Image (cartoon, rainbow, N blue to C red):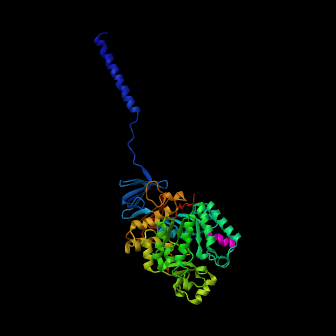
């Protein structure tokens, strides 16, 4: 074919090829630009402290589906942004010893930085209905041990409402009753109870052999015992004898034991009591303890703690007792009158020096032992954690901020994680952990609750999140959601 004829054909071929390429470029979409993830909520630019990894630095924390999804020095985008500038961002506190298990108490706990409140000393019976009653109705996470005290009260038909006041105090349980109490406690373990709660000061007719059987039950289930020991103070029998009983039973059976409120049991012997527990731990026994930052305890006036001989055992007198309902200090006449009616009383048995020694010991976890009823009770119910941060960290420097956070969050979580896998995701501020998070002003956080007026919220907690949901925002309660979850064993 002549060259002149081929030129137009080549031109048409090139034109067709170009048209095909351009059409292909139009039909194939260009790659989309990388999108920055958007999270449910971001706490931006706070001082993030994680007691497990020892992280302490400026970060933003992102939350998705109730878990921590990112921790970064870079800006993170979220549907909700909370400015944490100037705030410490830490894992929510875990109170192992919280008797107040109702909406009133959960409010005060949230305002004190607590995201999980557990009734482990006294425990509950029966366990399953107790959990069911709170399902979907709790502001914060909740849980309880299988309670030896309430089981004994039920089996022996004691008429006390909160603690034993007659049959459990005066009658020695029969073999059949002992068997039934243990069976009821074991049933509570089957229903998810977080170990066994036990209060030997309130069940005085239980012999050492009886208590050894409870330890054997705990060992079979590999569950810890949370115990209020028999005797306080320095008399014989006293705190040393009581500690020796618990440590011996732990050594004999292999059960783990947690000694509640060591400061209010040991009083002036707190250093000695702590050294005994340290010694047991050094030898490999699974023994732990806790304390609250107050010089006074509280109990039911009708209980055996204030039975005959209480002045000598506790080394106090009538004026060292304060009636919760009125705030009055008691006399012999008013003591005898109130003991007949029953009710709660505050006992001033300790000193600031001993409290400070307990706060300074790195082994000692922080726990409140608190409950309020219609605004009446002990200030520890509302102010324990803010008091530790404000008074003992900031003002007295008895412990560091990192230590206070560890002993209020990670240490309690680790005490329970062997029996409750849920606790492996709490007490930490890490990617993958539950978004139970607090953000507080380190220079402002302080307790407001007093012995005369305990129903006062702590101040300084700007944000408190439970499963990623704010229950405290801008320092105010937000009850628009009730995100609290049950914490159970296995």
**Residue 11 placement: quadrant:** top left
Count of marks, rendered view: 0
Give, as a single range, the part of the protein colored magenta: 146-156
Front residue of 404/207: it is 207
**117, above or below 234, in the image:** above
**Residue 355 placement: quadrant:** bottom left
Is 152 displayed left or right of 370 in the figure?
A: right
Front residue of 78/8: it is 78
* Residue at 46% over, 66% down: 282
**Residue at the top extreme, as displayed:** 1
Front residue of 202/330: it is 202
Is 20 displayed left or right of 326 in the figure?
A: left
Q: Can residue 225 be seen in this view?
A: no
Q: Can residue 153 be found in the magenta stretch? A: yes
Q: Can residue 450 be found in the magenta stretch? A: no
Q: Is the magenta stretch mostly helix, strand or loop?
A: helix
Image spot of residue 8 (x, y percent) = 31, 16
Image spot of residue 236 (x, y percent) = 54, 81
Image spot of residue 96 (x, y percent) = 52, 67
Image spot of residue 75 (x, y percent) = 36, 54
* Residue at 60% over, 61% down: 220
* Residue at 41% over, 66% down: 403
Q: Can residue 24 be seen in this view?
A: yes
Front residue of 442/270: it is 270
Q: In which quarter of the image is the C terminus?
A: bottom right
Q: In which quarter of the image is the N terminus?
A: top left
């Amino acid at each position: 074919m002549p060259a002149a004829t081929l030129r137009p054909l080549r031109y048409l071929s090139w034109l067709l090829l170009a048209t095909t390429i351009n059409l292909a470029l139009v039909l194939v979409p260009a790659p989309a630009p990388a999108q920055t993830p958007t999270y449910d909520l971001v706490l931006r630019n706070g001082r993030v402290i994680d007691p497990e990894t020892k992280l302490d630095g400026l970060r933003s924390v992102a939350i998705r589906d109730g878990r921590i999804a990112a921790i970064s020095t870079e800006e993170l985008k979220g549907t909700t942004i909370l400015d944490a500038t100037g705030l410490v961002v830490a894992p929510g506190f875990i109170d192992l010893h919280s008797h107040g298990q109702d909406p009133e108490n959960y409010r005060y706990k949230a305002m004190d930085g607590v995201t999980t409140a557990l009734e482990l000393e006294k425990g509950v019976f029966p366990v399953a209905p107790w959990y069911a009653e709170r399902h979907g109705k709790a502001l914060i996470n909740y849980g309880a041990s299988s309670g030896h005290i309430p089981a004994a009260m039920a089996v022996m038909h004691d008429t006390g409402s909160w603690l034993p006041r007659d049959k459990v105090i005066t009658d020695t349980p029969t073999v059949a009753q002992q068997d039934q109490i243990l069976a009821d406690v074991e049933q509570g373990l089957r229903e998810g109870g977080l170990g066994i709660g036990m209060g030997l000061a309130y069940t005085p007719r239980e012999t050492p052999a009886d208590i050894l059987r409870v330890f054997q039950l705990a060992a079979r289930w590999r569950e810890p015992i949370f115990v209020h020991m028999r005797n306080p103070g320095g008399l014989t029998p006293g705190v040393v004898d009581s500690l020796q009983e618990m440590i011996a039973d732990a050594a004999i059976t292999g059960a783990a034991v947690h000694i509640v409120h060591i400061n209010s049991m040991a009083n002036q012997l707190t250093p000695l009591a702590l050294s005994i527990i340290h010694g047991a731990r050094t030898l490999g026994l699974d023994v732990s303890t806790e304390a609250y930052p107050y010089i006074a305890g509280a109990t039911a006036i009708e209980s055996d703690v204030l039975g005959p001989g209480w002045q000598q055992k506790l080394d106090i007198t009538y004026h060292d007792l304060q009636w919760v309902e009125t705030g009055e200090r008691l006399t012999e006449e008013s003591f005898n009158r109130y003991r007949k009616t029953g009710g709660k009383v505050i006992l001033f048995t300790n000193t600031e020096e001993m409290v400070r020694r307990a706060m300074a010991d790195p082994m000692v976890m922080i726990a409140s032992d608190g409950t309020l009823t219609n605004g009446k009770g002990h200030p520890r119910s509302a102010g324990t954690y803010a008091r530790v941060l404000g008074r003992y960290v900031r003002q007295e420097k008895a412990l560091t901020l990192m230590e206070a956070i560890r002993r209020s969050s990670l240490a309690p979580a680790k005490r329970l994680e062997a029996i409750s896998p849920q606790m492996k995701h709490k007490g930490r501020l890490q990617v993958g952990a539950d978004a139970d998070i607090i953000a507080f002003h380190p220079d402002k956080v302080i307790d407001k609750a007093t012995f005369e007026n305990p129903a006062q919220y702590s101040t300084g907690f700007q944000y408190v999140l439970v499963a990623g949901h704010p229950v405290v925002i801008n320092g105010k309660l937000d009850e628009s959601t009730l995100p609290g979850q049950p914490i159970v064993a296995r």
